[in-house]
Amino acid sequence: MLFYSLIIVAILVGGYLLMSIDKINHINRGAVAMFTGVIVWLVYMLRGGDFLSLMHPHEFSQGMLIHKFVAENIIMRYVSEACQVILFLIATNTIVEVMNNNGVFDPLTRWLRVRSGKRFLWLLSLLTFAVSANVDNLTTVVLMMTIMCKIVSNHSQKIIYACTILVAANLGGSFTVIGDMTSLMLWVREVVTPSAFAIGIFLPALATLCVFNFSLATMLKGKVETTSTLNSFRGDDSMLTSWQTVTMLVVGIAGLWAIPTFHSLTGFPPFIGALCVLALIWILESLFTYRINGNLLFVKRDHLKNTEFISTQIILYYLGITLGVAALKECGALDFARNWLDQSFHNVYIYGVITAFASSVIDNVPFVMTGMNLFEVNTQSPDFMVNGNYWMLLPFCSAIGGSMLYVGTLAGHAVIDTVNLRLSWYIRHVFWRMILAGAVGLLVFWLVNS
C-alpha cells in the first residue's frame, strides 16, 4: 500500500510542476490538472479496499462495493465542496465582466491619468489592492492590466506597473474571504470567519504592499509616458448615463460585501449570495440598456467572452486540483506529512515560510488546498482553532509566494500574457524585493495576531 501511495504523490508532484511551467511546455494547466486528478484515483482504486480500511474503518465494511462507496461517499464529498467555490467564482467573475462591459470602470482610466510615475504607482497599486479584496485575483489582474495598458505607452514602464498590479492583486485578495480562491476555500470549509479573517490579515497585507512599493519606486524615473488618446469603445453599443453607472457600481460592490452577512444570517452557502447579486446586476443592465439596444439585440450581444473563457479554465483546473488533493488525503500521505511536520517543526510560522517558497514555484491553489487538508480544526491549540494563525497564514503566505515568482499564480500567468515579462528580469528585480516585503509582512502579522 505504501508503494501505491508513493506513486500517487509522484504523479501529483509531476503534474503540479507541469502546471507551473505551462508557458514553457505549452500544455494547458487545466488539462494537466484534470488528467492527474483522474489518474491518481485510478491508482487509488488498485488498492481501494486497503485504503478504505485504513482511512474509513468505521464507515466502510468489507461487504460494501468499493467503487460505489468511493464514488458516493468520498469523491462526491470533495467535488461538492469544490462546486461551491466554482459557482462563487463564476458569479463574481460575471458580475465584474457585466459591469466592465457597461463602462462602469471607465472613469478609473481617466482618474488614473497622472504624470508622476511614483504617484501613478501608488494609485494603481492601492486601487488594485481594493478591487482584489472584492473579486478574485485573476479577474482583478485582467481588469487592471487592461486599464493600465490604455494609459501607459512605454513598454519598460508597463513591465514595472504590471509587477505592482500582480503583487497588489495577490495581497489584496488575501485579506478577505471573497478576494481569492485560497481564502474562499477556507471560508467554505468554515475554518475562518469573514470579520476575524480580514482583521487578522489586512495590516500585514498592506504593510507588505507598502514596503514593496517603496522599493519598486526606486526603479521609476521621470513621468509616465501616457497614450495620447483614450479609446472607450467596449465592443458593443451600450452607453450608460452617469447615474446608471454609479447605481450599477454601488449595487455591485455593496452586493459583494453583503455576501458574508447574507451567509451569516441565512446559513446558505456563499455562492447563493453571489448568484443573487449577479441576478440583481443583470436585472439592472436589462433595465438600463433596453431602450438603447432593444431587447432582441441585447439577447444577441456577445460581451462575456472573457468570463466564459476564464470560468471554463477555472472549472477544469480547480476540479482537477480537488481530485488530486483528495486522493492525497485519502491515501494517507497527508497524515504522514502532518506527523512529520509536528515532530520536526511544530511552528505555524515555519509552515508559513514553507508555504511562501513552495507557492513561488508550485501553483498556490493546490499547495494551499493541500495545507488546508493537512491539519484539522483543533480547539485545544490556538493556532489551529477556527480563525487560528495557521489558517490565516495559508492564504497570506501563498500570496507572498505567488508574488515572489509569477509562475506561482494564475494571476501571474495573466500578467505575462499581457506584457512580455521575462522570468530572469522578474527574479533580478522583484524576487528579492518581495522577500524583503514578505518578511516585514510576517513581522506585522506576528505583532497583530500574537
Image: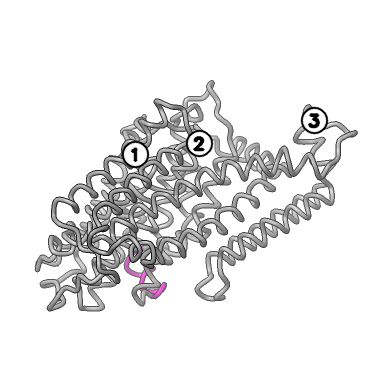
Badge 1 vs badge 2, beta-carbon distance below 8 Å: no
Based on the displayed image, in which of its 4 quarters is residue 204 positioned? top left
Q: Which of 201 and 182 is in front in this view?
A: 182
Element at label 2: loop
Instruction: Decide whether residue 423 is among the magenta residues.
Output: yes
Q: Distance between the residues labelled 1 and 3?
A: 39 Å
Q: Distance between the residues labelled 1 and 2?
A: 18 Å
Residue wearing tag 2: 347
Residue wearing tag 3: 57
Looking at the image, how many numbered discs can be counted on the residues?
Answer: 3
| Residue 254 falls left or right of residue 197 | left
Image coordinates for residue 61, horizontal then vertical, percent:
85, 31
Q: Given the image, on which type of amino acid does mark 1 rest?
A: Ile
Residue wearing tag 1: 201
Badge 1 vs badge 3, beta-carbon distance below 8 Å: no
Looking at the image, is 335 positioned above or below residue 20?
above
Residue lying at the far right in this picture: please name it. Answer: 63
Which residue is rendered at x = 81% and y = 45% of the image? Answer: 67
